[in-house]
Image (cartoon, rainbow, N blue to C red):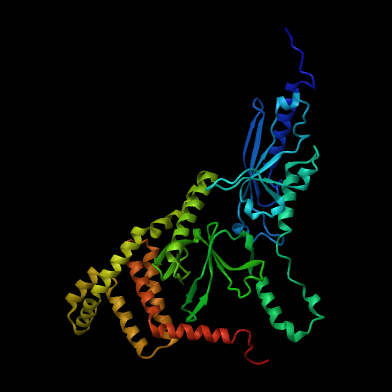
Amino acid sequence: MVTDPPSSSSPRRQRHIWSTRVQRELEKCRVDGALPCGATLRRMQLSEARGVCEGEFHCFVPFVDGSDALSLVPLTDLVIRMPFSEHCLNMGQVQYPFLAPEIEIRHGAIYLPMELREQKGPKVEGQEPIYRLKLPLLEHWSPSTTLKMLLDQMFQLVQQNDPTPSTPMGDKKSSTQNGHKNGHSKEKKKQQLLRMRKQDVRGRVYPCQEVDFSMSVVKQTPMLLQSGNVALLAPSREVKKDEFVYVQELISLQDVVRITPQKGKSLTLFFKTRTLPCRTFLSQHTDEIVNDLRIMVGETSSHKRRHNQGGTASRADSATQLLPFLSAEQSEKAKEMSAKFMGKLGKVATSVSRFLRGDEDEAMEQQQADPLAKEFAEIDAQKEAFYRVPSKVRLTEIARRYQYIAEEYACHNNKEGHVERAISELQLFIEHPKTQRILMETCAYEQSTAGIRVGPA
């Protein structure tokens, strides 16, 4: 017995048309280059029998003038639903594609302009509120509107809130030259830095100072931890006036091989590339920074494990090697090793003296028990000379010796506390009044001469 094909107006036929249409729309979004830069279809669910269809899109809206800071732009998680209801169809109500889809902002609504979002229900304590995305294309819906068109419009509307480009030089000719030279140089310097909208700053900005031993200076370097990066911000005295912050440098956690905190004092980063020297940041907020780093490493690694395939999985776990160095156990071990080391300093000095007098056996025995004894004793002698006659050259030499020891053992993944010992001694050296005086004097001098031309005209 041959059954007649369903008519074009039957519910079964309508359901099939709906299913074909939504599947085609979602498949279009998987084509390379179909969606705007920063948008990705992460998940799709389609059931013709149940009339369920939804696609989840991860959106990172880049800046209008380039996507250099794309990794710092927060995630906006959109769920687009295009359901089919036979009951509503029987009641004479239109269905998708004649009815606009519902777009839910599952995560990141607070980073969107107020006019683009509307809260769906009452806020539940401890949970992120659910919002509905509002777009002109949704309010004035047409069956020919595609998902790509919706995402394009959302990106354009979000980018309208980006900082406006700096005023071109030609527009400033009418202004007096003397009144704008200094301001223009500052603007030019800002234009060369990475820009980031303040609304995109998700984490806390920690006040930090980086110790640059090559220049014997301490620099104000606010630190932001976000999206697997350590962002070093440019200090700004016009924080309230600026609509955005400037990023001087981005340090990816994938490039960091070890992190050594000194509780309440400093944080030192070691890099996989051996030619890069370690970098020390002074801060009283080391506990909070370490906690944020631990959370960020966990989030970054789990996110990449979910979305990476096969051969790239090892790269996704590259940041997890930092977790042991951020644990409380490692900090306690470092303190214990440092305390033992301080107790041995007197013995080490005595042993080196005997070595110089010719009593080699005891000195060699001490060296075998403590491989750093000889080097630290030599540095102590350098420090005594520095304390008598302080100089930038001696300061740099002593600091680099401590750094070199720490870098060498960090490169070999030492777990005996040698890295922590070297950094602990470096921290004590930084805190010495005569070291502080040179660092602060250099900092004050650089600030007082900022913007002054030197040399022949």
- When the figure is inspected, residue 388 is found, relative to residue 148, above or below; the finding is below
Residue in front for this viewpoint, 335 or 420: 335
Q: Position of residue 10 (x, y in %)?
A: 77, 20
- Give the residue furthest to the top: 1
Q: Position of residue 253 (x, y in %)?
A: 50, 59
- When the figure is inspected, residue 138 is found, relative to residue 373, above or below; the finding is above
Q: For the N terminus, which image quadrant?
A: top right
- When the figure is inspected, residue 145 is found, relative to residue 297, above or below; the finding is above
Q: Is residue 413 left or right of residue 111?
A: left
**Which residue is pictured at 43% across the width and 68% down the height?**
268
**Which residue is pictured at 72% across the width and 83% down the height?**
181
Q: For the C terminus, which image quadrant?
A: bottom right
Q: Is residue 240 left or right of residue 374?
A: right
- When the figure is inspected, residue 308 is found, relative to residue 224, above or below; the finding is above
**Which residue is pictured at 42% across the width and 88% down the height?**
391
Image quadrant in which you'd find residue 50: top right
- Give the residue furthest to the front: 122
Q: Position of residue 228 (x, y in %)?
A: 53, 57
Please count the marks in the image: 0
**Which residue is pictured at 27% across the width and 71% down the height?**
341
Residue in front for this viewpoint, 58 or 109: 109
- Give the residue furthest to the bottom: 456
Q: Position of residue 419 (x, y in %)?
A: 36, 67
Q: Is residue 45 left or right of residue 25?
A: left
Image quadrant in which you'd find residue 236: bottom right
Image quadrant in which you'd find residue 451: bottom right
